[in-house]
Image (cartoon, rainbow, N blue to C red):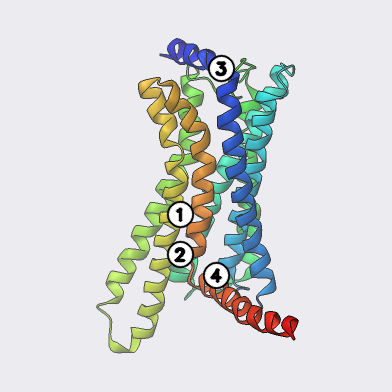
Amino acid sequence: MSLNISSIEASIQFSDYYVVCSLAAVISLIAVFVSISVPILVYRTKPRLHTVRHLLICNTCVASILYCIVQTINYIFLIFLRTETSDVGCRWRGYFAYLTIAAVAYSYLIQAISRFFISVLSGQYRWLTTFKTHYILIFLQWLTIVIIPLPSILTNDIYYRPTSFCWVPLKKLIHVIYTYFAYYILPTLTICMLYIIIFYRVKQGTKRAALLIRNNHHEKRDLELLRNIMILLCIYLLGGLPSVLFVMTTNKWIYLISIVSMSLTVAIEKISMIMLDRDIRQVTKSLICRRTRVMPFQLETTRK
């Protein structure tokens, strides 16, 4: 299987890479633009969007920006810097690529942990809902994702291959299994477990007395926010589906689609995030409506 996949990669002409990587780079730029606009919007909208939830959303945007930048650099090395054949340099590019992939997934994980703190543990431990706690969460997330991809540079599994990205080759089965588990499966399963816990708590809340109706409303709101996290994470994970299909089919065109799919899903995920987050969506609408109201007045004054 690995030999067949290697032959497929070798059969791809650089003209194919030019088209696919250029398209992926353009999509990455769109994703970077949307990701940058969200923290700017949060910073300028005081105090409505100055919450721990939007702090973690901005953290996810930073992870997405780094992912798009690193992937674009990998495209540049593949197309324009073909004389760079160092195995060590290839390992470092693979390390940063895996680091940014994990950064996005684990940023959603700490969002889910935050929802768990607020919905389940805030009654007993109020300090878990503070900004200080969430800054510590962000620090631990980035520390974790710096450590997780270390096998990429501590082993010789990644090496330079012409017409190929600096990924772990499929013949290194143990390392491949580790990457899928550490970067995708572990954070996804943990988020699902937290979703189930909060869902169970909300169901239990419906049986409480009428005095607790207000608390039950907040728990349902936490469940809604965690559901949005799951939706956005699933959109992000769908970007890896063409890669799985390529392993199963060894089809050249599916391989080329897999190069674009990750950047595309990051862009879609960022746009969906704006649509799903009620506060960001309302602030964005108000800004758009404010500009449309000002424009006719400006045109009228210019005519006079």
- Marks 4 and 3: which is nearer the front? 3
Kindly identify the residue that appears in the image at 37 percent across and 79 percent down. Answer: 217
Q: CA distance from mark 1 to mark 3?
A: 34 Å
Residue annotated with mark 2: 276
Whole-angstrom CA distance, mark 2 to mark 1, is: 9 Å
Q: Quadrant of the N terminus?
A: top left
Q: Tell me the SS state at disc 2.
A: helix
First of labels 1, 3 by sequence position: 3
Kindly report the distance in space between the C-alpha atoms of the residues bearing marks 2 and 3.
40 Å
Is 300 on the left or on the right of 119, as rendered?
right
Of pointers 4 and 1, the one earlier in the residue sequence:
1
Q: Position of residue 281 (x, y in %)?
A: 51, 70
Circle 4 sits on which residue?
A: 280
Residue 209 lies, with reference to residue 1, above or below; the image says below
Amino acid type at image mark 4: Ile
Amino acid type for the residue under numbered disc 1: Leu
What percent of the width, then of the height, locates residue 157?
A: 58, 19
Q: Could you tell me which secondary element the residue under label 4 belongs to? A: helix
Tell me, yes or no, whether the two marked residues, 2 and 1, touch with CB atoms within 8 Å: yes
- Local crowd size for mark 3, using a 10 Å CA cut-off: few (<14), some (14–19), many (≥20): few
Between marks 4 and 1, how big is the CA–CA gap? Answer: 15 Å
Residue beneath label 1, please?
Answer: 232
Left or right position of 247 against 36: left
Q: Please report the residue visible at 47 percent of the width from the left and 15 percent of the height from the top.
A: 8
Horizontal and vertical percent position of residue 50: 63, 73
Q: Tell me if residue 222 can be seen.
A: yes
Where residue 96 appears, as percent x and y from the top left, is 65, 35
Q: Which residue is mark 3?
A: 13
